[in-house]
Image: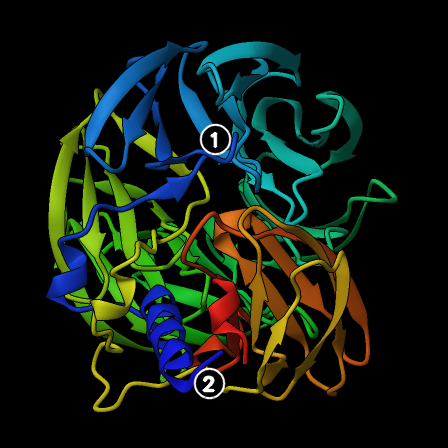
Amino acid sequence: MTTRDRSKWKAALVGALLLVDSCATAMPRAAAGPAGDAHAAKAYVGLFKDSAVAVVDTGADRVLTRIPVPLGPHGLVITPDGRKVYVSSDGASVVSVIDTAVDRVVRSIEVGSTPHGLAMSPDGRQVLASVFGANEAVVIDTATDGIAGRIAVPQPHNSAIARDGRTAYVGSQQQGATALVIVDLVERKQIGRVPLDKAPRALAFDPAGKRLYFTVAGDDEIRVLDPARNRVVRRIAVGASPHHPLFTPDGRFALVVSQGLGELAILDPTSHAVAGTVTVGKAPHWIATSSDGRAAFVTNEGSGDISVVDLSSRTVTATIPVGEAPRKIAVQPGALSLGSDAHAVRPRLAGASAEPEPSDHGTQDVRGLTEIDLEADDDYFAPTYLLGAPGQKLRLEIENDSASLHNVTIPALRIDRDIPPQGKVEVEVTFPRAGAVPFFCKFHGAMGMAGALLVGSEEQRS
């Protein structure tokens, strides 16, 4: 590959990984759907008072259809591959399963009276339903959509599953005994509890799984729990009546909605301070983000709409009416589209004076190969660029040679795998028909730990 070609691909890769300026903002958000087609990702929104799920085209910013579900949809999660959505109805006793290929309910799972929040395991194999009326946390196997186990938890509301997929924290709202109840999803039992002075509301782990962020009723703050010690180690003052906390996939921003002010607060996870706020609709309830971390989607229960927020410019770029009392929302995984002119987009990191670039550890021509070894270290992939044929399939064995936890994320291929220190993982990739597909470590991508699958001609060989 020539120096000129490498510079072109590097520019395309940086543009895929970073927040871009107004030149790129004008491009439509594109995504790879469940079947792998290039189209806008769909968002699924539970409409509590309409007893329906609105399906939103995030490219056109409009509602495509509504899917009827039982009374009072409360919890809503999507599988990591974007193929299935699970919806709990707290006016009934079921969790509905939506097939996103046809956008209809294909199965109903009886879980018990008044199911509240749902949590999806990082590997997509389990859904944890907080069945408030039955005083149970119910484990659903997503392969069979059957109940795999039940764990006694008094009045569970929302929950979060740790990165290991084994441990979960369930917010118990039992009067006089409010707590975060810690459960083992393999042994199906309680293994601890963190007593609280007030009722827990919403919970979320940071991308590294080292901290649990949660809110409680009546406090204008986010509490930060260290799961290693099960102690609250920090309290972050935010706006009135905060509800759902969430991180962008790359960990660059922490987000939380303030229901009393109608705001989305954007936090710096390093300084633990509010870096900015964005006015959204009335009584914002829940947040989802795009896979590239550029956009946040906020449901506004009081105004019946969704605010689409550009996190770089901190502005609302669209307001989408969806129906009565939108609460939970989930967005299909997607990727930034890289067209043939992607290298012409000049990227920049918001607030940065210089543009970080991938740490270049070489290009390997892999055309004709079926598998290769890839090194992950602090903070780079080697080789950084893989030059393949259009549509070529390739197995990557990625070995972490460092003492740090690393990760490989390829949003366009719906791949998100952690690589333990001195460990390795295998992933199957498919090269695009043209252009570049970026990959990166979601913990260290901002430090240059990134690469790309490239498609080029014979003349582009090194």
Q: Which residue is mark 1?
A: 75
Q: Nearer the viewer, residue 381 or 213?
A: 381
Give how far across and how far down residue 450 sits, in percent: 51, 75
> Dot 2, how many residues are within 10 Å of its Cα: few (below 14), some (14-19), or many (20+)?
some
Residue farthest along the front direction in this orientation = 459
Say which element carries label 2. Answer: helix
Query: Which residue type does callout 1 highlight?
Result: Gly
Answer yes or no: is residue 281 visible.
no
The answer to whether one can see residue 202 in this image is yes
Picture coordinates of residue 244, whole percent (x, y):
38, 50
Residue beneath disc 2: 447
Which label is found at residue 239? none
The Cα atoms of the two marked residues, 2 and 1, are separated by 36 Å
The quarter of the picture where the C terminus appears is bottom right
Residue type beneath disc 2: Met
Image coloring type: rainbow
